[in-house]
Image: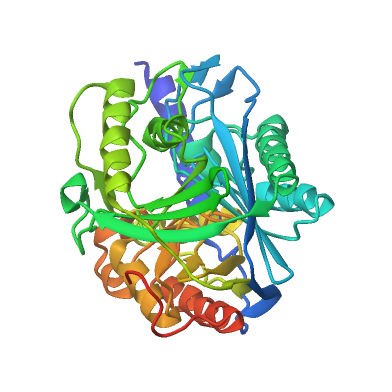
Amino acid sequence: MSSSRRSFLRSLLPFALLTAGAAYALASWNWCGPWEERTPEVLSQVRGEGPLRAGAAKVALSPPFPVVVAGYAPPRSEASQAELPLQARALVLEAGGARVGVVSLELLFVTPEITAGVRERAAKAGVKEVLVVATHTHSSFGGYDARWVAQLSGTGRYQESSVNAAVAGAGEALEKAAASLRDVTLEVASAADAGLVYSRSGGDAPDGQLTRAVLRGAQGPVAEVLVFAGHATLIPRQRSFVDPDFPGRLSALREEAGHGVSLFVQGSEGNASVAFNEGQGPERALGFARKLSALADGAVPASEPGPVRLAFARVQTALPRPDSSRLVPAFTRAAGDNFLCASSPREAEVDALALGPLELLSIPGEPTVAAGRALADASGATHVLGLANGYVGYLDTPEQVRAGQGESRRQYFGPALLERLGAAARVASGAVGFSSDAVGSK
């Protein structure tokens, strides 16, 4: 290298250092601003008791092919078709003048934008209260979350057509379900096999419990709701097909066997991984679905006598300021916080649904087993459901967050997150009237 060139490069060094320092200072500036703290607020509620009616339907989703396959960090594959059709499944319940809809979408998660669109469609069909959940399938289509963090970490580039596909399928399923209401009885049972799952990050181990709620009409089952906790990651990444993984295959197996429309709902699956390694890809997902179906068959439900209680409440709570301390190196902490602030919601919705002996608390994220137990203790819920009506990421206990352990290494917020959601859970359960001696597992 010539001396003149070396001299030129040396002259640029101070400018480069100054530029880097300015960029670091700019990124480290507190762009978050103040985050509001307020008491959780009841947005809406409905309560009724009487003879139970139910209607159910499923509608195939129509992803905007070609579309990114969601579920993992880059690089991501792009899908041009589906291994099996992705589905939206809907259940509408009615008792004592109260009407509530439940939608299960074969997606990685749902967003407030999707939830609002589904509720708008449902209201036109006379269903004003709707719970929208995702099966947490890591091989479904993406593109439906506009937040930068979501686009980078899981769902890929945002495109409105993906949102429209999810809303259209869910809305049509709800409309068909509402139009098919009929008298039903409610039957509830649970069975467990702890060998089906394990904790992928330490902490409390999942118990492998599957809860089955059957809505049975005069001509046979109208619908079935299956609650289980386990990451739907049996389909390998980097495939050119979207796929519903084991939740979709389980629902299809149950429907083929005559159990009505089968809605799969995730429980506290934040640290729950599937312990099943027979076969590869679709074969493995089908094998595990058969295991779960057999477990469901072993949960022989008993009919709930008399009038059925149906209640639902939506509660909004402010979220704590995002905290990237476990996600990035210490010297980039401020910049990490700023990045999370730009993509993190400032409020979240927590819902409570009571259906006979089932008292369900729903969280817009992925609670671990320990976090789910803490929320159940706080609210009296028989079950804590994840991935409902939005997505705030993982939720672990304050102890795990402070220690930087467990799933807190993926959590976007600090240790106060569980406290905020727990406060909202107490308000929601109070609005619905959860009983202290409800049937079920906490």
x%, y% of residue 145? 61, 42
Can the viewer see residue 412 in this picture? no
Q: Nearer the viewer, residue 431 or 425?
A: 431
Residue at 22% x, 54% y: name it: 201
Percent from the top left, x then y, of residue 141?
54, 30
138, above or below 329, in the image: above
Q: Residue at x 47, y 53 (%)?
A: 214
Q: Which coloring applies here? A: rainbow
Residue 282's quadrant in the figure?
top left
Q: Is 29 in front, or is 105?
A: 105
* x then y, percent, for residue 58: 61, 36
Between 97 and 288, the one nearer to me in the picture? 97
Q: Is residue 310 left or right of residue 331?
A: right
| 164, above or below 381, in the image | above
Q: Is residue 324 left or right of residue 93?
A: left
Q: Residue at x 46, y 43 (%)?
A: 135
In the current view of this chain or complex, which residue is farthest to the right?
124
Q: Position of residue 29 (x, y in %)?
A: 55, 63
The residue nearer to you, when weighing 388 against 208, is 208
Location of the N terminus (image quadrant): top left
Quadrant containing the C terminus in the rendered view? bottom left
